[in-house]
Image (cartoon, coloured by chain):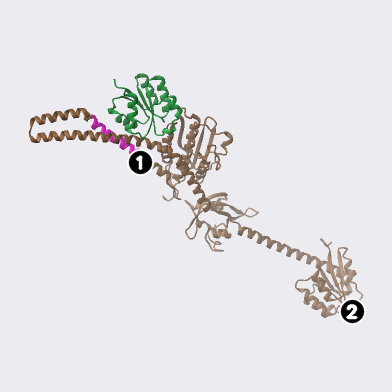
Chain colours: A green, B brown
Amino acid sequence: MAPVLLIVDDEVRVLSALRRALRKEGYEILLASTYQEALKLLAEHPVDGVLSDHKMPGMSGVQLLREAARLRPAAARFLISGWPEEVPAAELRALAIRALIPKPWNDAELKSELRAALLR
Amino acid sequence: MLQPATVRILVVRSPGGAPAEPVSAVAALERLGAEVIVEAVGSVDEALARARTSEVDLVVAEPGAPPAPVARLLEALRADGPPVIVLTASGEEERALDWFRAGAADCVAAASAEEALPVAALDLIRRQRAARQQQLVERRIASLRRYTRNIIQNINSALLVVDGACRVTWANGAAEELLGEPPGGLVGRVASEWFEGESVADSPLLRSLEKGERFRGVEVALRRSDGERVPAAIFCGPLRDDEGNDLGAVAILQDLSETRRLQRQLFHSEKMASIGQLAAGVAHEINNPVGFIDANLFQMEEYVADLRRLWSRVRALVGAVEQGDPAAVRGELAALRVETEALDAEFLLEDLGKAIRESREGSERIRHIVQDLRAFARSDGSERVWADVNQCLDSTANIVWSMMKHAVRLQKSYGELPALRCHPGQLKQVFMNLLMNAYQAVVARVGDTGELGSIEVATALEPAGTPGDSAGQFVVVTVRDDGVGIAASHLDRIFDPFFTTKEVGVGTGLGLSTAFHLVSSQGGRIEAASREGEGSTFRVVLPVTQPARGGA
């Protein structure tokens, strides 16, 4: 079965571009543009990985990944942010976030980070 | 009886010693009282010397004195000396006329001197005193007049006095300098010719003249005869005499050129500071489209490589068809089908179009942001222009929205507003400042909790009749937030320059004072209400300007 990857970003065009970039990577991709949608998808699907934006209305990416860790402890957690330096390092460690990917992202780097965690 | 002080009378005895007749002028004069000091001198020369060195109120020449020296005495004292009474010896009374001609103040017959001399002396002394007093008063009036004239001439403010026809009756040097006229060049000119504005009838000076209104520091634009424009503050009011009769109006004008220049600099640096704050938010807003455009381009490159592979299959198939080799055609066709399937060509073509559309939308967004930012950074000209306040507010809200959207829910409700004659760039700066403050107040309350604060922006046309306002309608722009609020003790200081509660480097302390100035220079005001912990409401109240008459 293809690994299930949930991508969360309040910017739908970014979601679309990420899906495009990962099309041939062999994941089953779920998209959410609000934290509510993301929580719903997390509850309903056996998610293997979560890739979330950080600065989002209502709930930050770190908070969302904390929820994800509670709902799907086994899922690998990734953060993507235009301001990676603003994300507190302590949170990254506490939540065992696999990678903090800067925006704009490098396709190859993004793919290899995801592969390392999801395609073994 | 001779107030005040003592009176000094000099009696010139006849040189021969004993008087020709047994009169005692001294004794007669001493009857005037203790405050009269009578001194006798033996000669005219001595008398002149005494009159020159000490205060002498009256000189009496006794009849025994020879006529020539008496004439010399009269001549010497005639111009500015004390008055002289000549006692005429009996038989010489007819010479009285000569003595008067020679400058005597009075002539008294020695025979009746005992009675008449004190009376004549008293009369002369009184007159002398009155004349001296008069002189003193005149001198003081003249000096006072010079003093006030010097004050008025030397004060660094232009002073104009006009008559009922607005004609200059008085102007000081600063007025001449301010209006670019030579000394004396203002008197007689019609003052309204230097005031420019929407309507001359609205000029403060004319309103003082016609309606008796008073103005304190209203800003006016002056146009000098050489065409140069000077911003000035006018303080004026009607000029009335003690009975309340209208004499015209008096105005003080203060040159504001330098003040304006410094203010412009200050406002500009404040604006640059807020643009600096904005830059972070805008960068965030630009970062997203740059991110997905970049990723899309990368992907499209792969799509193009895929399509090129497909195209080489198509060409191979065309080659086989042209050669008329059925087996080769079948082979190439099969290969093309496999390739098409493998590449998911249908999806690829559709997604390529989608990627291009989405990327174009992204670049369009970037273009808009840059445009808004440029419009914001642009300075206003000195002229006011007709502008749509809703549009000013909306474009400003759009710029700041990008940086606040992760923390704020923004509600807009725009009323229908008439165009306003204003400096739109300055209004945008004011709105920007209020929105940034609102945003910072919300962030200070919600912090990183992910909770959304709320900011409401609203515009409305409010009717006249608000207490304290005389006439006309108002455009009111309200910015309300549910942030931390402002402590009551701070509320009356928030418009003071350099007052800030923000950390060093976050606020200049000039934002609200600048906003306040920008609004009040357009005839409006800013009102603030706040409750700590509940939020703040700022209202920008702008008077509606009537379109100029005559369809301009």
**In the image, B324: left or right of A14?**
left
How many numbered markers are drawn?
2
Residue B247 or B473: which is nearer the viewer? B473
Q: Is residue A71 above or below residue B507?
A: above
Q: Is B356 colored magenta in this rendering?
A: yes
- Chain under disc 1: B
Residue receiving disc 2: B16
Q: Which residues are magenta?
A: B347-369
**Residue shown at 75% from the left, 63% from the top:** B133
Amino acid type at mark 1: Arg
Front residue of B198/B431: it is B431
In the image shown, does A11 or B176 lie closer to the viewer?
A: A11
The picture places residue B205, in percent across and down from the top left corner, at 54, 53
- Using a 10 Å C-alpha cutoff, classify the residue at mark 2 as few (fewer than 14 neighbours), some (14 to 19) or many (20 or more): few
Q: Position of residue B297 (x, y in %)?
A: 29, 36
SS class of the residue under badge 2?
A: loop
In the figure, B476 relative to B83: above or below? Answer: above
Amino acid residing under circle 2: Gly
Q: Tag 2, which chain?
A: B
Relative side of B199 to B117, left or right = left
Q: Main secondary structure of the magenta part?
A: helix
Q: Is residue A111 magenta?
A: no
Query: Where is residue A110 shown, x and y percent of the image?
Result: 34, 30
- Indicate the quadrant where residue B36 lies: bottom right
Could you say whether the residue bearing mark 1 is in a helix, strand or loop?
helix
Identify the image quadrant of residue B167: bottom right
Are discs 2 and 1 less than 8 Å apart at CB? Answer: no
Q: Who's the residue at 21% across and 35% down the image?
A: B308
Residue matched to label 1: B367
